[in-house]
Amino acid sequence: MSGTLYVVPTPIGNLGDISKRMADTLALADFIAAEDTRVTVKLLNHLGLRKPMTPYHRHNQDTAGPAILERLQAGESCALVTDAGTPAISDPGEDLVALCAGAGVPVCAIPGPCALSTALSVAGLPTARFTFEGFLPQNKKNRRARLDALRGEERTMVFYEAPHKLAATLEELAQVLGEDRRAVLCRELTKLHEEILRATLGELAETFRQREPRGEFVLVVDGSDPVQEEAGDPQAALERVAALREQGCSLKQAAAQAAEEFGLKRRDLYEMALGKR
Ligand code: SAM
């Protein structure tokens, strides 16, 4: 019978965030697949654990992945960890999870620290719908294409950024999404010098023209305002009536709702939908 692949998050700065379940899983696993064994050994020392480790990172995953799968299929259990935070989130792991899941090996996630959810939960920007953008592409053309695709994005956006690129990224985002766009910059989350800067993209860009960015950063940016349907546009209102009808509304209900949304008279829209006008 196959062993289980455990996906184990580790602290993003504060060792107090180690959970009992995370420590128990590391203790029970037969071996640990680590992004950098030199980093993980420090965590194991802190927990008083000694464990066999094997490296698993973006430069060896094509060979290390199948080797780990083979051990799992032979019955060993494996804890997958990265240097900090949740594996597979802008970190190695996604391919190993897919490989194991595809081969029918059980995969079990241990919930824990993640810079994305930590930043989002403290930002105070809408969280009902958000998009995780991770690191923007480094290649100029791909980067520009990604930024252009975000112009009309209405959901809250979350970016990871390295300190030496932060100032340039803030400038670019201010240019593309607008200087006045609300944003929250989360620095050194869970650490001694944690800092949450709530401002606009323009203000943040200005701040980091003057100040050298140090530490780790997550940037949370408000979505753009929803595009308002042009008031009184009968064609758009008729399309809305059709959409509401497809959702199960009667013609009368659909015409009443669409008329209100588009600032038209109920009866006019009802008659237009009936083809009388
Ligand atoms: N898998 C990790 C996670 O889920 O938290 C993220 C790994 S990614 C390689 C590293 C990036 O995460 C950093 O460049 C930064 O954007 C963000 N990050 C990690 N720890 C952070 C912290 N304590 N404060 C702010 N950002 C952090």
Image: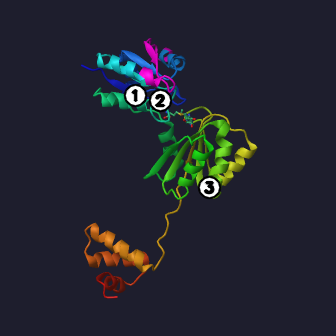
Highlighted range, magenta: 45-64
- How crowded is the residue under tag 2: few (<14 C-alpha within 10 Å), some, or many (20+)? many
Q: Earlier in the sequence, mark 2 or mark 3?
A: 2
Q: Quick check: marks 3 and 1 in contact, CB under 8 Å?
A: no
Measure the C-alpha gap from mark 3 to mark 1: 36 Å
Q: Quick check: marks 2 and 3 in contact, CB under 8 Å?
A: no
Element class at badge 1? helix
Query: Type of residue at label 3?
Result: Val
Element class at badge 2? loop
**Would you name the residue on which mark 3 appears?**
176
Res 237 visible: yes
Q: What percent of the width, then of the height, locates residue 17?
A: 47, 29
**Would you name the residue on which mark 2 appears?**
92
Q: Which mark is residue 244?
A: none
- Quadrant for the C terminus, please: bottom left
Measure the C-alpha gap from mark 1 to mark 2: 8 Å
Q: Does the residue tagged 1 have its C-beta within 8 Å of any atom of ligand 1?
A: no
- How crowded is the residue under tag 3: few (<14 C-alpha within 10 Å), some, or many (20+)? some
**Would you name the residue on which mark 1 appears?**
96
> Where ligand 1 lies, by quadrant?
top right
Tell me if 236 is positioned left or right of 200 in this view.
left
Res 24 visible: no
Q: Quick check: marks 1 and 2 in contact, CB under 8 Å?
A: yes
Q: Residue at x 33, y 69 (%)?
A: 243
